[in-house]
Image (cartoon, helix red, strand yellow):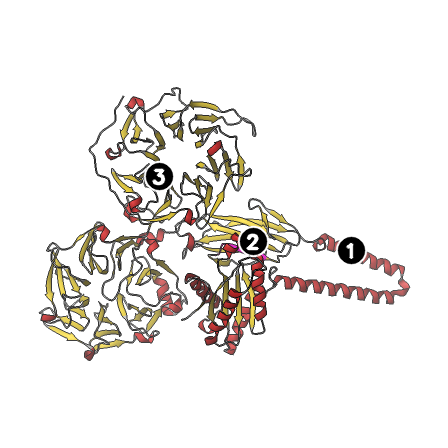
Amino acid sequence: MTLINQKKAMPLWLGVMLICTLNFAHAGTPLTDYFKDTWSTQEGLPHNSINAIAQTSDGYLWFATWEGVARYNGRDFRFFERSTKTGILDSGTRTLISDDNNGLWIAGARGGITYHQDNQWQPQLTAQGMVNHLLKDSSGDTWVAVEGLGVFYRPKPSVVGDSTEDIWVLQNLSAYRLLEDTKGRVWAATDKGLFQLNGQNKQEVLAPYGLSKLHVYSILEMHDKSLLVATDRGAYTIKDNQATLLHPNLAGEAITTLMQDSESNLWLGTISKGILRFSKGHIETLNTQSGLPNNRVLSILQDLEGSIWIGTNGGLMRLRKAPFTTWTKKRNLVGNYIRSVIDVDSESVLVGSSEGLSLITNNVALDARLNSGRPVSVLSFAKRREGGIWVGTYLNGLMLWKDKRLLHHLDHDNGLPSDEVRAILEDSHNNLWIGTTDGLVRQDASGQQRIFTRDDGLPGNYIMALTEDDRGQIWVGTGVGVAKLTSNGFEIVPINSQEGAEYAFGFWVEPGYVWIATDRGLVRYNQKSEELSLVGRRAGLPIDKFFQVIYDGTNGLWLTSNRGIWRVDYHAAHAVADGRQREIAFEHFSESDGLASAQANGGSNPAAVAMDNGKLWFATAKGVAMIDSSTISQKNTALLPLTIESISADGRDVSANQKSVLPAGTNRVVFTYAGLGYVMSSRIEYRTRLVGFEDVWASRGKNTIAEYTNLAPGEYQFLVSARYPYSDWNTADRVYKFTILPHFWQRLEVQIGVALLILVILAGSLRWRFQQLQKNELRLKALVEKQTYDLRQQSEDFQRQANEDELTGLPNRRAFDLWLSEGFVQAKQQQTSLILVIMDIDHFKKINDHYSHLIGDQAIKSLAAQLQLIASNQVHVARWGGEEFTLVIEGVDDIDIAAYCDNIRQSIETFDYSDIATDLKMTVSMGVAFVNNVESYQDLLRLADQALYRAKERGRNRIEIWQQ
């Protein structure tokens, strides 16, 4: 027999901090480039020990705990506990096994085994002890690993419903894990070693390799078809009749669980050392010191989006790759507060901070200075044609970095008006331009210097940005405007015409255009027409102040700010600037995307740089951040799993797995759905369409509930689609078909029969009383008129029901949309005041969860009754859907609306709801928008909705008014 191969010991990488996940992966991504999220009982888990993790093919994530099974949709956990319906005999759950049929095997304490598929539970025969694992092999046999008893299997029944006897293949031991490999061999990991269960020889497998008396906790077939065995004394590979220790540093380590990810990295959970990742001969460690909830790892899973889920004794952790990678002092930067960054070559960037210079080469950060000395506070950079990098400092003037040495060049003592240098430029005529806080210095090739100030035509002396355009003109950005140097001297570029812009923080030049990052948005200057255009708040950007603008080479403009980094489409930015497009979509990046700080720095240059290889670097208040822009186009391309979680008709649950026939008179149909994406679950957007009722898609925003009332009898199809922000809607539309039956008198055959009966009666009457034709004719006319009147009244009742909310009696969303569209046009034409208020009950889900949905309905009716009291010819009230209401107000001045709304808010907050439920309190948040801020009623709705969202972000129970 071949003995274990021995290798020289190598040190472990300990204390690794994890940072982020998107579904685009790069082989060899270090753990430091991961982002981590954690959950415990405080975040909704039923228990902190995560014994097993699984993901079913519909996208749901499942977690086995000692207090039942938790299903996760990216927002909420739903618990499944002991019950006769589920077949779970005890809440203590040990194992979860998913299959290709959207099924899930669940087993655990007291031998309980059950199967869940498409919301249906199929309890199985009970085992004799706690089930640690379960396997359904390729032939249909079921293998069960039982604590303290061994392993048995149940042959596939020959007839559906036929029961089979348990056949024990191992006894008097504890079996932990089962595996069927690609050769059809079934393996069992036990406390007495490793066994092949369907072979002729049932002897322990590892002993012949000198590995006797090992506790084997898990087994994995790797991508190369070799086996990896986790034991109480290390992890071993079995291949070509050899058992080899995976790594010398794993000798003696108790390893409990194994997983190989899509990049072929091996993840090893341990009993007391956290989780280890083995990649290309190297080991990295994640433990409690670096954020893991507990050092005992029980389960590991890679989900469909590439995230790594780790179950421990102390909670759950998710590792996901972020688009951004950040370097800080923890990764050997000299300082964290970064002011400037510049590319040195295709593999290196120079990073300037308040504490000195760093050089990052091939993702490794080092001190950029060989000549150690006092720290230099760096502000700005520029490339030097003769080699090296010009370095502008806070206190030491202009310096030169060359050959990893920092040399003095100019300061206040030899020509600079100030030692604070915030911008540098070498132009095409070999002039060196130095922007200070007291003026601009030009040094020509001979060394002659000249200082330019406000007296020479500059808008101000505080220089923050310099660039040269494609015509050879020098552009100067200051704190009070922009100037360009032409043959006639400096000319002011009136950026203040763009909503009062003053600060010019940075430039980006392309042929024919100069883009300027300002305190009012992104300004474009057209060289040919000399016209300025603004891409700012009016175009949909949520903030004003941008520090830098860079182009990534793949149709993306990147903007930095105090509130994160923003990406807009290059062509869309031109379209907005040309007036061909009203709004621009944007993508926002912050700490959840890998930035250590969302505060990107500005006021000196360059604070961002785009490299030819597609990598973009950004200076932030906590490190320098890098993103590979080429990966952005790969983001969110996979179909987003989508499920309809529940359907109710008039408060009764309806099965979502089959077409439903709803009884006549059904008034309210409610759908709850979820996009099963976990990378940005809180940002998923939805749209729905009820075919048979709606002709177009209805945007639902982030709302996961769609409610329809007063639907006419007929056949309907409910469609729902989802997407991540600013990506295309996926085509994985979830469809549910249902029929609402008509009342007896609404049936076509009944109506035809009634009509025929009337005709027969009329004909008989004519024949029987021909002599009294005139009298009968009058009587028949009266009958027809009465029936016509009844039908008209019935039609009017239908019309009223179609425009009235059944629960509250208020106008519904259809009536509101019709009135708002007409009222908006009238207000615009007559230039009268029109104010839209969207109101949302705060934490309404908690009212439903704490009291009941019945109490929730009563709370909504109570609020509607309060709002009905203020309704008038000038105040229109409607229920918009769910817990949302709208008020359209005429005749109230804009300056009075805040007090008016606050009176309503206080009245709702202080109202006595004790007749509904003891201790019930209810508050609302309001978003307000004015008709004079927009050009369409859809924009009015959007601004009011954004104001409502802001009210929620800022604590709820408040009013937020949209301000330009």
Query: Which quarter of the rendering shows the N terminus?
Result: top left
Q: Secondary structure at mark 2?
A: helix
Verify whether residue 308 appears in magenta: no
Q: Nearer the viewer, residue 75 or 547?
A: 75
| The residue stretch that appears in magenta | 703-708
For residue 403, say whether it is visible.
yes
Q: Secondary structure at mark 1?
A: helix
Question: Where is residue 626 shown, x and y percent of the image?
Answer: 27, 54
Q: Residue at x 34, y 60 (%)?
A: 567
Outermost residue to the right: 771
Alpha-carbon span between mark 3 and mark 2: 39 Å
Alpha-carbon span between mark 3 and mark 1: 77 Å
What secondary structure do most residues of the magenta stretch adopt?
Answer: strand
- As drawn, the label of residue 756 is 1
Q: Is residue 832 above or below residue 252?
A: below
The answer to which of marks 2 and 1 sits earlier in the sequence is 1
Residue beneath label 2, please?
853
Looking at the rendered structure, the kind of residue marked 3 is Val
